[in-house]
Amino acid sequence: MIVSVATSGVLLLSACGAEDKGGSASASSAAAPVAGQGGAAGGSPSAGQGLSLLSGTAKANNASPRTGDWAVEPGKPATKPEARQWVQLSASKAGALNPVVVNGAGFTLYRFDKDTANPSKSTCDGDCASTWPPVVVAPGGKVFLDGVDKSKVGTVKRDDGTLQVTVGGWPVYRFGKDSKPGETKGQGVGGTWFGVTPDGKKAGGGAGGDAGSGSPQAKPATSVVLFDDRNFGDPSQGLAGKGCQNVPRDNVASSLQAQGSLKIWSERNCTGKSRIVNGDVADLATIGFDNDISSVFFG
């Protein structure tokens, strides 16, 4: 009987020890962080998916060559979307756009009017995304911010599952025809594509906004000279009067000079897409009107 009781005691103690060990193991497991959740290590700011937002340029943060935005060399056209371990957003100047956001290689970034910012949603897929490659970053990647406020930057999941960078809620893109840093060939394309400012607005004022070198409160112009070439290069043609005036040789102007504000239209009789300009515009391509003025409204 004594042996039997002793044996039972040993078994009971063993069971209690096993329960204690099991309980400790469960507590440790519950306390351990789960990889891929929450912010980056060290409490770095995060835009979701473990994305780190870091102040300064990629170079200042010692990013490796031929990675991130530098994987596409300057002078090379944009390619189809590929998630990067890092991207850079810099407030800069490109062409007539100031300020506008550029990437780490100096290429202009754009926003699309058919997207939405609240909530963030990209509608550019398929062939559109080949022409306008979205700026995508890998989960857990980094975004270097140079003159762009952290509160304006985030990501949105695209239909293909990749993460697209947003500025002011707007998904951002490159333009396939911008072949070198500083080009803005995508500005105004289709009346829906515009460079993006550091706070997510349309660079250059966007469609219906103000352009040119004059004051936003400039008095109405009574005449305009339309030049066939950029930077006011001849040949040229003049137009004056009141109200709507059709251009004699339409769809050939690449720059214009005017004293005051006027409204340009893509179709005759002041129809189609339009844009208010104040003063001279050295390159109408920057506002999406290269070879696309058919009428002008004065007053």
Image: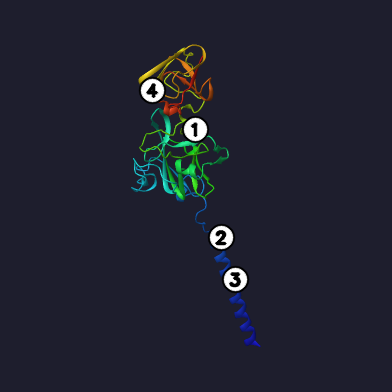
Q: Quadrant of the N terminus?
A: bottom right
Q: Position of residue 157 (x, y in %)?
A: 53, 47
Q: Which of 180 and 214 lies nearest the eye of the viewer?
A: 180
Q: Nearer the viewer, residue 156 or 199?
A: 156
Residue at the disc numbered 4: 228
Query: Label 2 amino acid?
Result: Ala
Place residue 87 in its image quadrant. top left
**Circles 1 and 4 in contact, beta carbons < 8 Å:** no
Q: CA distance from mark 1 to mark 2?
A: 54 Å
Q: Is residue 30 above or below residue 214?
A: below
Left or right: 34, with 180 as reference point: right
Q: Amino acid at mark 1?
A: Gly
- Give the structural element (helix, strand or loop) at label 4: strand
| Among the two numbered marks 4 and 3 on one chain, the one whose residue lies closer to the N terminus | 3
Label 4 vs label 3, nearer the camera: 4
Which residue is outermost to the right? 1
Q: Is residue 120 left or right of residue 277?
A: right
Q: How far is disc 4 from disc 3 in space, using C-alphas?
A: 87 Å
From the image, tell me which residue sits under label 3.
19
Query: Where is residue 78, by image quadrant?
Result: top left
Mark 3: few/some/many CA within 10 Å (<14, 14-19, 20+):
few
Q: Which mark is residue 190?
A: 1
The numbered dot on residue 30 is 2
The residue lying at 60 percent from left, 80 percent from top is 10
